[in-house]
Image: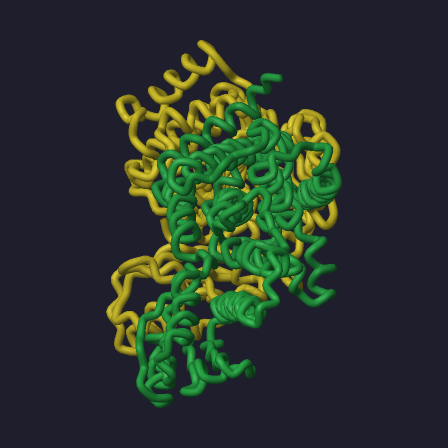
Amino acid sequence: MLNPRLLSVVRKEFIQIVRDPRTLALTFAMPIIQLFLLGFAATSDVRQVPLAVWDQDRSAASRSLVDAYRAADYFQVAYEADNEAQVRRLVDRGDARAGLVIPPDYGRRLLDGQTATVAFVIDGSDPTVAGTALAAATLIGQAKGAQLSLERLARRGAAVAGMARPPLEVRTRVWFNPDLVSAYYMVPALIGLILQFLTVILTATAIVRERERGTIEQLIVTPIRSWELVVGKLTPYVVIGFMDTVLILFAGMLIFGVPVNGSIPLLLVLSGLFLVTTLGLGLFISTIASTQQEAMITALFFNLPAIFLSGFFFPLAAMPTILQWLSYLIPLRWFLIIVRGIVLKGVGMEALWPQVAALAVFAVLIMGGAALRFHKRLD
Amino acid sequence: MMQSASAAAGAEDAVILAQGLRRAYGAVQAVDGVSLAVRPGEAYGLLGPDGAGKTTFIRLLVGALRPDAGRAVISGFDLATATEAARATIGYLAGRFSLYGDLTVAENLRFFGQVRGLGGSELNSRARELLGFVGLNGFEAWRAEQLSGGMKQKLGLACALIHRPKVLLLDEPSSGLDPLTRRDLWHLITRVLGEGAAVLVSTPYMDEAARCGRIGLLRAGRLVAEGRPGDLTAPLIGRVLELSAGPRRVVQQVAAADPDVREVLAFGDRFHLLVSDAEGPLARLPQALRAAGAQVERLRSIAPSLEDAFISLYSEAPSVSSPEAAARHG
């Protein structure tokens, strides 16, 4: 349908976007900067945690234990300490994030068939690092313990061929992101984050700008219909939303090697559905705010809780029940499941329809409500 | 009052018709029951100081604001029910620059033309014609924000005229413009009138209002007088004296003390005295002034100006604070 009034607004809006360096920078620089920040810096992968070792035993057995920690990618034996104070100082200064203390009788107790105890200290100030380090340290210790028991059994001559093996072995296999690379998880979700952040602010300020600069007054007096004005103003931001989606997707593939397992057209269609909710929110904000600054702050007021409750930074499963319930009201939460599902798992509508249905409901409610509030008047 | 009679009489062929329009902002009654009618080819000057309700009234006439009471009918379309049909016949120049500063002159014209349903060669030729009309030939590629104040207003007028409106509403079109540019703008408005459009122009300037066929005086949201410029000054004939005398302070004191002098207005090196009766002051004042030590050059009865009429109407109304504020000069 070629509606000349609608087209004229779209054309005008594009000209204004292209001529406004601030909008352009926000549109194209922000996704790339965020991509780098989140892809490289905000990774929660814990690797090579610096470890201080105080080995008081210095036996073959103790060296073998230290080697077990050294072999795992999680730790890097950074310091050999000579006393407890030194370990404490290293951890206090943050030079070491963990400390391993082996008592002087470690080797002897093992030989005597007794239980040997070692101490493992972890700097808990960063819960993510501490959590991973704790799990890794425990696992390495248990594995080493099991190996020692088997060796002990073997020495006692109970070594029937089949018995020198652990009775149970759990073979884990991680699907979709086998190496547990954070970037694979973060980059697809960044599409949702950017769309949420950018399009809400851009649409809200673009509409409020007409009011702030007084141009709305001239528009009001033209016979353009409210819906033509709204659709005309929003259309360029739909285009920007799609461009950013594709930009992040390809940059993610090229720079971080994120595998795109699912259908890109499906992703674009569902991004469009999600965009309806964010543009609707932007439109709604434009009916509340009277200056661009107010619009920015109001957008932030809506965006920050949406991002925190979306499961982007913090896993939803770890949140208190009430916040989990609240998160159901956040369209971004549903879209993150969709985008991660398509990109990482390669799933389609057969798996995603509940999320798509939820998004569709929000799209109708938010855009419909905002459109009802939008009037072609000054009051 | 005059305006109710004329609004009723002009209702049949009026293209701008306001009937009892009211609009309040909180406790402030910005427009308080204004009725008026303007016919095709007629220029109506809405004269009033800042805050009199001119802008609010014009916004009610274009449907940018909704009235609390009353109705506005533009080109026969009721603004409340046939809003867009009414707007299709309106050309509007807002008091504040309201074109797109980041679009060029040509793009602004094109945009408002397209939004008004023009296109193709029709739009191109109309845009070219208007650029010539307002004297902006050669500035097509300039961003609107780069234009001078007068050029901005001319571009605004061109955008308002792009669809050949039957009704042209101008809110203080020449505020802040130099005298030459104001004259240019009025030439343009006169030509639009010649093409049969009805023009309503608000202004705080007397001389500008005097160019209109009819004037309405707006005070605190009410139309306190309406008529041709001659009608408005008629009640003051024989009631305005011009006095050349000094020093200033003594003259003001002595003149104001005369029982028949209602208002003393300073006009540069002269004074206008609004009097209830001319005979008494003409006889008494020269002696009284000389007795107080003033030099009297001349005291005579003069023909009342629109400004005298305006100030007399304002000073008779107790709610207006100061005539100086009311009589902002152009």
User: Is A162 rendered above or below residue A189?
Assistant: below
Q: Nearer the viewer, residue A31 or B319?
A: A31
Residue A340 showing in the rendered view: yes
Q: Nearer the viewer, residue A225 or B10?
A: A225
Residue at image position (73%, 33%) is A350
Residue at image position (29%, 70%) is B248
Instruction: Give chain A's shade.
Output: green
User: Is A209 rendered above or below residue A267?
Assistant: below
Residue at image position (45%, 77%) is A123
Q: Which of B293 and A343 is in front in this view?
A: A343
Residue at image position (43%, 66%) is A68
Q: In this view, does B169 lie to the left or right of B156?
A: right
Image coordinates for residue B133, horizontal then vertical, percent: 36, 21
Residue B78: quadrant of the picture: top right
Q: Which of A134 and B158 is in front in this view?
A: A134
User: Is B193 rendered above or below residue B226?
Assistant: above
User: Is A239 rendered above or below residue A377?
Assistant: above
Image coordinates for residue B252, horizontal then vertical, percent: 36, 71
Chain painted yellow:
B
Q: In this view, does B287 lie to the left or right of B164?
A: left
Q: Most extreme residue toward the front, as rendered?
A: A157
Image coordinates for residue B286, horizontal then vertical, percent: 33, 68
